Image: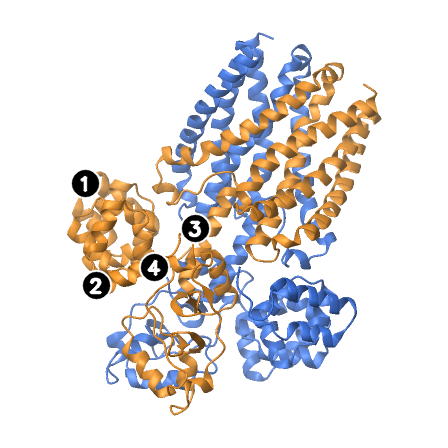
Chain colours: A orange, B blue
Amino acid sequence: MIKYPVQTFEDSAELLAKALGQHDLAGISQALAPLNTSEILEQLERLGTTDRAVAYRTLPKDRAIEVFERLDAALQADLVSGLKEADVAEVFEQLSPDDRVALLDELPATVAHRLISGLDAKERALTSTVLGYPQRSVGRVMSPEFVTTHPMLSVGATFARVRSHLDDAESVYTIPVTDGGRHLVGVVSLRDVLRADESLLVADIMKSPLSVPATEDAEEAARYCADAKILALPIVDAEDRLVGILTVDDALRILEDAETEDAFRSGGTEPLRRPYLATPVGTIVKARVVWLLVLALGATLTVQVIGAFEATLEQQVVLSLFIPLLIGTGGNTGNQAATTITRALALGDVRPRDVFKVFAREVRVGAFLGLLLGSLGFTIASFAFTVPIGLVIGLTLLGVCTMAASIGGLMPLLGKAVKADPAVFSNPFISTFVDAAGLIIYFLIATAVLGL
Amino acid sequence: MIKYPVQTFEDSAELLAKALGQHDLAGISQALAPLNTSEILEQLERLGTTDRAVAYRTLPKDRAIEVFERLDAALQADLVSGLKEADVAEVFEQLSPDDRVALLDELPATVAHRLISGLDAKERALTSTVLGYPQRSVGRVMSPEFVTTHPMLSVGATFARVRSHLDDAESVYTIPVTDGGRHLVGVVSLRDVLRADESLLVADIMKSPLSVPATEDAEEAARYCADAKILALPIVDAEDRLVGILTVDDALRILEDAETEDAFRSGGTEPLRRPYLATPVGTIVKARVVWLLVLALGATLTVQVIGAFEATLEQQVVLSLFIPLLIGTGGNTGNQAATTITRALALGDVRPRDVFKVFAREVRVGAFLGLLLGSLGFTIASFAFTVPIGLVIGLTLLGVCTMAASIGGLMPLLGKAVKADPAVFSNPFISTFVDAAGLIIYFLIATAVLGL
């Protein structure tokens, strides 16, 4: 764990909880005073909405703004309703345009309008630029505040430009180079500017720029920025004109959010959007219940499949013993394949066009796993029950694993192809189709082998 | 998708595959020529080991080094065996100390020793510093090359120091401030240095430093760096002396790797460590089979549970119809809770000490979900079958959901407490314990309600 300078995390949490319980404002302030911004954030993210607003209001003004800037937009919006309008307007003005837009997306339209109209003309224009791009696009999360240079400017002049924009540019370490028509033609790092002779031209030292269009999906752009190991990625419009930059710390936040979403959806629940302890129980239930219902309704397919083979089961009740094991193994195999391909898609290792490659691989992987598990299942079940039962179990495992791996591998690709979240698409399909298909394979093999 | 300047990604991939198939070195070189480094990486990561080495060797020297630097350590190690020793030594020298250590960890000891002894004294010393820290600690991934300043130095002198270290410091944008004993006492950003008057002292403008000890877990440190939104995090030894820095792009890579691991393990498979298409089928089978076996062996518990209630099933074969639905719902509910808590632990939203808070929440969430699903199940099953059957299904869903959510929520915390990977720990436990316990709940309720 990270060391805390003055007191442990748990001490602070306890002090804070106690002071909040007693509505002791001085006590709350005291509990937070020795903490740095990161530590205050961690404490606030564990509190319920009301307590969080109370604790936040005890912070000194400068600290309060720093804390506000780093809260998730959903928590910022929670706070806004508990603050005085003048305070909100002040904090809002201090936010960078992209953070402002993230907050606006969380607020009721009337509050959002009031906040925008309270901005000065320049800040309002910057905010509108970002607001103009579609949700989930990189234009929506980029920063429209940047410092640029021109290929025919000298290194010395570029350095002077950087110095004069230290306060308003989001990043001064990566400097996009644009021509007279604002087209992106290159990029120089501040390090290169410092290294080069002052009299050289930017054109002599600039590198060819990486860039993505503002309408690009934010997650794709963030991964591109991350993979390229650059501190800021220039964002351009359809005519290749520079409109903003995506900084690596924003890229990191986007990827974290995307991965939280993926993790939740692979686990069959909607993302919570707020830290766990700060989320009311009712909201957690809501995030899970739809998925559970969809999966449970899908599972009624298995009721029907077993119902169709009820006569077979009546003759051989022993067959029911293996139902959870067999469909469990199918589900696990399907999940393994789906997880692998979902992650490979997220990382850009696999593309929707690779569908045949993936299918060919997963059939082989599934058959291999089926052979291993099937032989084992055959041996164990033959000893514990009878050889024909062993044969049924062994053959079913072979069939189920092959089917489940190939279906599991295809689903995320199919999801991506129809522009759905691969994880959202795969999960219910695997749970229902693979389970039902597995049962059919089982009963068909059983009737054939046992001659029922 | 990202735009490619000259040709589409698929065109390049096709050209490359064709040239590789015909062993046409000029063709390979031609296919890669129009691509930038990121694009070449993407292409190489889709090839098998042999093809990758062939394609890599056609790259011009400068480009080859750039590409090598950005490959994952596992793929670097694959390449090393296909290159001439002199070429390897040259590339190895160009790597930064932390990347060097990552590669060394992948290589056979003899090769590693030879490479280290080929370095000059300074580079060898830097590499040894990093090599001296334990695996998975931040010391092992930090950069030991940094530029520092002193509180009593002027801003102007600090700027001169930065200028003289442009080539050898990993980051010049975050400048740690150390005292005579190398203790970390502050931090200044290059932006602040440029903004401040040259004659001011560093002590006047420095901020209090965030830092983590070099023995800290790399993932914790990376998340700390990410959450603090800083470009570089100073790393200190036990006496608070500066020993390295963790840059945000390294933090990002560490978090990505950690999340890939988590995603794979939640899906019940070991991480592949290489891109999917670059991984042999046998390796994929190996990554999955152990998990499948563990889960299948765990599932034999369900065979025994059903076996114990075989007489009940013989009387009421209809009960077997609901087995997949009921244990499936239990498994889904357990997974939802485990996923939520695993992610909350990874993000630092929940700590092992919060076990009672989590348990209290999950019991309520589970009971709530159970009531909703149970009422629905009761209604549907009462109509489709009989009211007593409906009652059995409804009550079982209530019991199973409550049990599964609370067990599922506790498992990642228990895993973390015993220092296991929360995802690794939760998955098999939920699949086996929750399934078996769910079946027992089901049969007990059935015998009670149906009077069997």
* Residue bearing mark 2: A121
In percent of width and height, residue A282 lies at 37, 32
Please, what secondary structure does the residue beneath circle 1 have?
loop
What percent of the width, then of the height, locates residue B159? 34, 83
Q: Residue at x 47, y 27 (%)?
A: B402
Report if residue B108 is visible in the image: no
Mark number, residue B304: none
How far apart, in angstroms, are the residues tagged by discs 3 and 1?
A: 29 Å
Q: Residue under circle 1?
A: A23
Callout 4 secondary element = helix
Q: Mark 2: few, some, or many residues within 10 Å (few <14, many ≥20)? A: few
**Vertical placement of A118 versus B98: above or below?**
above
Determine the secondary structure under disc 2: helix
* Mark 3 or 4: the one toward you: 4
Circle 2: residue type? Ala
Q: Identify the chain of the residue marked 2, using the numbered disc in the image.
A: A
Residue B85 relative to residue B419: left or right = right
The chain holding disc 1 is A
Residue nearest the observer in this picture, A142 or A29: A142
| Among the two numbered marks 4 and 2 on one chain, the one whose residue lies closer to the N terminus | 2
Same chain for the residues under marks 2 and 3 in the image: no
Tell me which chain the residue with mark 4 is part of.
Answer: A
**Residue B357 at x, y percent in the picture:** 38, 37
- Report the side of A131 relative to A295 (left or right): left
